[in-house]
Amino acid sequence: MKTRFSTFLLLLLTYPLFSIAQNNRIKPYGVLPTKYQVNWQKMEYYMFIHFGPNTFTNVEWGDGKENPEVFNPTGIDCRQWAATAKAAGMKGIIITAKHHDGFCLWPSKYSTHTVRESLWKDGKGDLLRELSDACREYGLKFGVYLSPWDQNHPDYGTPQYNQIFANTLNEVLSSYGEVFEQWFDGANGEGHDGKKQVYNWDLFHETVYRNQPQAIIFSDVGPGCRWMGNERGVAGKTNWSTLNITGFSPGRDAPPTEILNTGEQGGEAWVPAETDVSIRPGWFYSPDTDDKVKSVEKLMDIYYTSIGRNSNLLLNVPPDRRGRIHAADSTRLMEFRRARENAFADNLAAKASVKARSPAKDPNSRNRYEAYNMLDSNYDTYWTTNDNELNPSIEIDLKKTQVINRLLLQEYIPSGQRVESFTVKFWDAKTKAWIDLAKETTIGYKRMLRFSAVSTRKLKIEFKALACPVISTLAIYNAPELVTTEKAVENKNKIDVKDRKLISPQSFESAIAGENGVNFLKIEKNTPLIIDLGKNFKFSSFSYTPLPEEHSSNILKYNFYISADGKNWAKLRSDAMFNNIANNPVVQYVALSKEIDARYLKLEPLEIADGGDIYFVAGLDIYK
Ligand code: FUL
């Protein structure tokens, strides 16, 4: 009796070990994610918060000289941010604890440009405390953005600064509980007197891991996850989670953005993509963009081109001047959530049968690797084949003819990213033939395909892989198609100038036709843009519309003048910058300090974003 009981006990105790051993029968391929990277990838969707003095000064990059007293939100409510993120279906929040102006959203002892010097809560507030508490309350993970570029700190550009930045990091990472992601901006501009800093990334990383060993470090080259190369929300259709990083560092010395967009097959490190994009044209709140919150159709597009392309989505929702998420943004987030729920309400594959047209991996534990494991919602069960089977295929029978337009596949990434390409075919009952539906490349953690609806009972997927594929999920949907209603929304304060005339250039090299009949004039850098409004207008801000292509020939630094007669000019902006125009070439709004009454406008380029000698412009507009 005794012996039998202990054998039973032994079996019971060893069972979990045995099943782990079974899992290990899959030979991993290439570099692998850490368990923290796997957990991070499963978060998929979380909120970015840009908040600070820029929220109040209407600029994208402050220069560190702003009076800290401008930071004076009247009704900050971090619980409202967290409640909104939670209701939106997000899993965490990352906040700009310190942006390029150096302003700290907590009372840092390493800076004199902080909430302590602001009017908010008489200098007694700590925004990181309030937000990290709110995240805990709502079951969200908490993350921080800290810009090493600091235009305020007097030591920026000196050898001491690296240690000061490390101390600052240490202060944040040891004070507010668990941090799931440390976001490092690679920007490395000038500080006081044009001084630049050579960043000590090893020191910064060591500081992060000492405090938060589980944290995912974001930068152009990871090591936890990488920027995917643009701020439009479009990851590469081909998207490897692997990247070569030796010899590269964040910022100027990063790999080309095209490489960041697609990753690299066989890359030496696991550095998966994260898509950061703003729900508004800019990263910081501006009242000028209340009517420019991205449409639900646009957000759905972004969903498919980010999460649907093996990337996490970090969606920026900038709180307004009260310190609350504006109703325009929160309403849109809820519509976006509903649109996703509608799209993926009914997984037609859950009721289907699937068979692999290749032998299962292990005849002794067949059900562990059988094809039907792809149809459940458990990521940790999967289908795989024999090790030497690199081109297997599967056939799905939907049991009856169905209309379908979406397909979702997931690789089991703990055993690496293995699929190089795949072809999807559907059975056409009329012609009794398999017809190609899609030919695609990588899958990774998650890949979603959108295609025009087809009516079929059967699908076939043929894989080409670097090691036998390990597929966790296969799902099929018939999602309602959203009609794209996105149009260039006119700003309600824009002044409609009917009789404008272009005075300079008198002739221009060429014009590029953009969408909605917009023309982008291509002009030589030393020729200013001069416009005659036809008569005098009263206005208090203007905007420059650049070519919406990253790192293109758009104006970066400029002077702006006005005139009543086109001869005598008053300079209203000198050596001014359209700061983030290289990475985020959206319409640039500039608020003037007072109302202007003028007939002529002159925009004089001083520096072009790509360093070239020509610039593009599609509009110079004025606003009430
Ligand atoms: C960029 C910054 O320069 C922008 O201001 C913004 O913070 C964006 C998320 O990253 O590098």
Image (cartoon, helix red, strand yellow):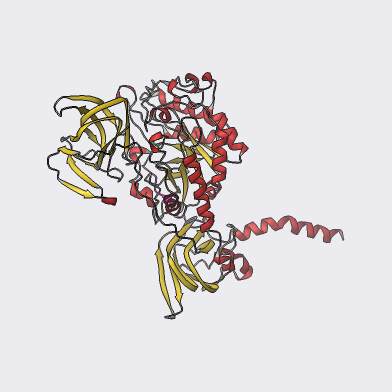
Which residue of the protein is positioned furthest toward the right in this rendering?
1
Give left or right: position of 447 versus 253.
right
Rendered image quadrant of residue 543:
top left
Q: Quadrant of ligand 1?
A: top left
Give left or right: position of 176 versus 222.
right
Percent across and percent down for residue 198 are: 36, 30
Rendered image quadrant of residue 59:
top left
Percent across and percent down for residue 277 are: 42, 44
Quarter holding the N terminus?
bottom right
Q: Is residue 26 visible?
A: yes
The prevailing secondary structure element of the residues shown in magenta is loop
> In the displayed structure, would residue 524 be above or below residue 416?
above
Choose between 189 and 212: the one closer to the eye.
Answer: 189
Is residue 493 shown in magenta? no
> In the displayed structure, would residue 179 be above or below residue 483?
above
Quarter holding the C terminus?
top left
Choose between 306 and 384: the one closer to the eye.
Answer: 306
Q: Residue at x 41, y 66 (%)?
A: 438
Count of numbered badges drawn on the protein: 0
Percent across and percent down for residue 391 are: 45, 69
Q: Residue at x 14, y 43 (%)?
A: 508
Q: Is residue 603 visible?
A: no
Give left or right: position of 305 versus 172.
left
> In the displayed structure, would residue 89 be above or below residue 562?
below
Percent across and percent down for residue 44 are: 51, 49
The magenta segment is 241-246
Which residue of the protein is positioned furthest toward the left in this rendering?
506
